[in-house]
Image: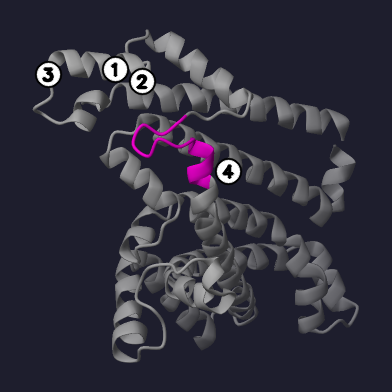
Amino acid sequence: MTLFLARKLTWTLATLLVASVVIFLALEIVPGDPAQVMLGINATDETVAALRKSLGLDQPPLTRYLSWVTGMLQGDFGKSHTYSVPVVDLVAERIVVSLPLALIALFMSTIVALPVGLIAAARRGGAADTGIMAVTQLGIAIPNFWFGLVLSTIFAVWLQWLPSGGFPGWSAGVWASLKALMLPAVALALPQAAILARVTRSALLETLGEDYIRTARAKGLSRRAVLWKHALRNALIPVLTIMGLQFAYLLAGTIIIENVFYLPGLGRLVFQAISLRDLIVVESVVMMLVAVIIAINLAVDLAYLVVDPRLRANH
């Protein structure tokens, strides 16, 4: 167990190092001078050069990379060139939107997908299974931003039950904030629920073909008892993997949905920073999200040991 944790932590640190290099180099080769973009096309060369120096852009790439990584290790993620505030403060303002949105969407997709996948596996080859697979295929095919626009048209414009966009802030009340997040959360949850339902069905069908399942049935256990007490728990390994990946996607990949619904989240922050060439914000926020994704994957790996005791014996 100790060796397993040490190996995982080593791979985590190595992945973070590689990710930091890739992120820095990717933004280095992006065309355009941030100082020129900030000052406009009418700025003189002297003014641009002075701003580049104040931003540290005149330093060699290696020096800037080491300065950035050293700062992050000390908790300093830099200062936004556009907003003139620390990046950490910007992230703190936006995470209170993106994190609840991701959690609500993951909760919605999970409570829908697990029972649906279970029903499809229990009715394999039947009308219910065929119908569920057809609906999930449609859910995967529909872009979430298009579904978000449809939801906004129906529930915000026609029925006027929910707001069409914007976020009032948690100070306006929990219910008002949850109402603002409801439509984008449903739009995000739809394709994730479709994927998770199909994975749940496939994992259950594979598990139901195992010898111990046939033994349980031979001992007189009902099909329902076999599904819930034996098959479902052993099928959770791939399901947990997908759930971990989905949460990481929902937290880091909501740029389009946040722009559709005008939500001031992390995705919209990254989009605005890219548009304004605020590279330090892009670098630091993306690096934070990468670290969160890696931490989620590590947590999923540890959850495997809880779900399946056989893995604990192997480690």
Residues packed near mark 4 inside 10 Å, few (<14), some (14 to 19) or many (20 plus): many
Question: Which residue is labeled 1 in the image?
Answer: 52
Question: Which residue is labeled 4 in the image?
Answer: 293
Location of residue 246 in the rendering, given as x and y in whole percent from the top left corner: 54, 56
The answer to whether 68 appears left or right of 45 in the picture is: right
- 166 or 15: nearer the eye? 166
Residues packed near mark 2 inside 10 Å, few (<14), some (14 to 19) or many (20 plus): some
- Name the front one of labels 1 and 4: 1
Question: Which residue is labeled 3 in the image?
Answer: 44
Dot 2 lies on which element? Answer: helix
In the rendered view, tell whether residue 3 sits above or below residue 136. above
Q: Distance between the residues labelled 3 and 4?
A: 42 Å
Dot 1 lies on which element? Answer: helix
The answer to whether 246 appears left or right of 167 in the picture is: right
Residues packed near mark 1 inside 10 Å, few (<14), some (14 to 19) or many (20 plus): some
- 5 or 60: nearer the eye? 60
Magenta highlight range: 79-91
Q: Residue 55 carries which label?
A: 2
The amino acid on which the numbered mark 3 sits, given as a three-letter code, is Thr
